[in-house]
Amino acid sequence: MFIGEYSLSMDNKGRMAVPAKFRASLGSGAVLTRGLDNSLFLYPKKQWDEIAGKLSRLPISQANSRAFARLMLAGAWDIEIDKQGRMMVPEYLRKFAGITKKVVVAGLYDRLEIWNEEAWNEYKANTEQESSSIAEALGELGV
């Protein structure tokens, strides 16, 4: 399970450290892809295989299904963690998420999200302001 929030730096080669507590869960393979809200999603390989399977079964006759599958699958990149605990984030994914130097890694149970630090702070502030209405809406869903 991934939880917590970590502020990190990316070097000028596009490498960033993976928080130490997550390395074992990602050591047998991971996949990085475009996420939502201009973030990146990082999945352990096993979790990714399940999600990719679901995406591949979406109806290709529906434009939204095709678009979402393309976003997630075409943008995917196999991740290897080096001996220093770092991973490479390819340029096209850094550009998508607006990541240059400062990043935030957020643990979200079955995945990690990687954000441009400024974008994360803005998103988090907006979400915290709306927390009561969000909680109310989720309460209607039984959460």
Image (spheres, helix red, strand yellow):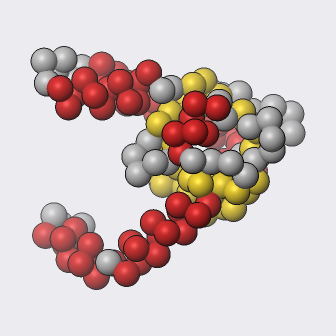
Expressed as whole percent of the image width and height from the top left, the position of residue 120 reads 53, 62
Q: In this view, does 24 lie above or below 75?
A: below
Q: Is residue 51 above or below residue 119?
A: above
Picture mark count: 0
Q: In this view, does 72 lie to the left or right of 39?
A: left
Image quarter in which the C terminus is found: bottom left
Q: Which of 104 and 53 is in front in this view?
A: 104
What residue is shown at x 52% (from left), y 39% (from top)? 96
Whether residue 19 can be seen here = no
What residue is shown at x 59% (from left), y 54% (from top)? 116
Furthest residue toward right:
84
Q: In this view, does 110 lie above or below 54?
A: below
What residue is shown at x 22% (from left), y 68% (from top)? 138
Whether residue 69 can be seen here = yes
Q: Nearer the viewer, residue 100 or 85?
A: 100
Expressed as whole percent of the image width and height from the top left, the position of residue 91 reads 64, 32
Quadrant in the picture for residue 59: top left
What residue is shown at x 86% (from left), y 39% (from top)? 84
Quadrant in the picture for residue 70: top left
Expressed as whole percent of the image width and height from the top left, the position of residue 14 reads 74, 37
Expressed as whole percent of the image width and height from the top left, the position of residue 74 reads 44, 21
